[in-house]
Image (cartoon, rainbow, N blue to C red):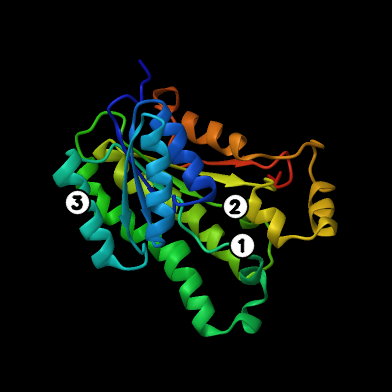
Amino acid sequence: MSEYEGRVAVITGAGRGFGKAFAIALADRGAHAVIADIDDAAGEEAASRIRAAGGRATAIACDVADENQVEAMVAEVVRDLGGIDILINNAGLHSAAYSEPMMKLGLPKLRRLFDVNVMGIIICTMAARSAMLGRPGACILNISSSAAYSSGGAYGVSKLAVRGLTMAWARELGPDGIRVNAVAPGLHLTDTIRAELSPQTLAAVKAQQILPLDGTEDDIVDAMLYLCSDSARFITGETLRVSAGFALSI
């Protein structure tokens, strides 16, 4: 039996991309994947795919920036599944448009970016804490970015905040027995990335990697499975860079 058998994993933004891959991987290993996504149709499609393959999944429409929706989602999970073992704060705004200078973005877009990428993690973590108490191996995984290690763009700043939140929550929730870590992906050739970035941009980013490899969703899924497993029981407050050396620094 997998160590994930019977565990309840809430993954935000899991209707597509990394979140969907996380949900599928955890469900394949026996967890009940709760797909919390603002796009109800995408969330239900992902959950249906998991159920069709014999796994367990529930889709719940939820905007992570809305505390009422998040609290309702957590209450539904507790009512139907008993609690939460794993929370993956994956929902985020990450299109190329949010990498523009902050003065160019303007306040409305900046506010939405930080509401989702930063406040979303705070809201979900606060709402889920009581549902995770007393559950062996309880853990939270935040999704940062290699952009958090550079100095440009509002998106990178929001993901730098995710690194800070990971350390702060690790300290605050450690006495509760809840580990908190993060993953910082580099260039991973998902459908979204291929659609948003030109071949020239992709080549320029890859040229800054130490390893001349193409990143895939599987690389991030493997990192998630490790940090959410008992093999990482002595790790908390850390951000694991999965970037082929792109974000290497001291």
Tags 2 and 1 in contact by the CB under 8 Å rule?
yes
Q: Which residue is pictured at 71% across the width and 44% down the height?
A: 248
Nearest the camera: 166 or 91? 91
Estimate the spatial distance between the alpha carbons at disc 2 and disc 3, rounded to whole Å.
30 Å
**Considering only order in the chain, which callout, 1 or 2, is on the residue closer to the N terminus?**
2
Q: Which residue is mark 3?
A: 76
Tags 3 and 1 in contact by the CB under 8 Å rule?
no
Q: Which residue is mark 1?
A: 156
Quarter containing the C terminus: top right
Q: Nearer the viewer, mark 3 or mark 1?
A: 3
Nearest the camera: 45 or 63? 45
Tags 2 and 3 in contact by the CB under 8 Å rule?
no
**Mark linked to residue 145:** 2
Is 228 on the left or on the right of 205, as rendered? left
Estimate the spatial distance between the alpha carbons at disc 2 and disc 1, rounded to whole Å.
7 Å
The amino acid type found where label 2 is placed reads Ser
Q: Nearer the viewer, mark 2 or mark 3?
A: 3
Estimate the spatial distance between the alpha carbons at disc 3 and disc 1, rounded to whole Å.
33 Å
* Disc 3 residue crowd, few under 14, some 14–19, many 20+, Cα 10 Å: some
Quarter containing the N terminus: top left
**Considering only order in the chain, which callout, 1 or 3, is on the residue closer to the N terminus?**
3
**Considering only order in the chain, which callout, 3 or 2, is on the residue closer to the N terminus?**
3
Q: Position of residue 148 (x, y in %)?
A: 61, 56
Q: Is residue 139 above or below residue 247?
A: above
The answer to whether residue 64 shows anywhere in this view is: yes
The amino acid type found where label 3 is placed reads Glu
Q: Which residue is pictured at 49% across the width and 56% down the height?
A: 162
The amino acid type found where label 1 is placed reads Gly
Tag 2's secondary structure?
Answer: loop
Q: Position of residue 174 (x, y in %)?
A: 31, 40
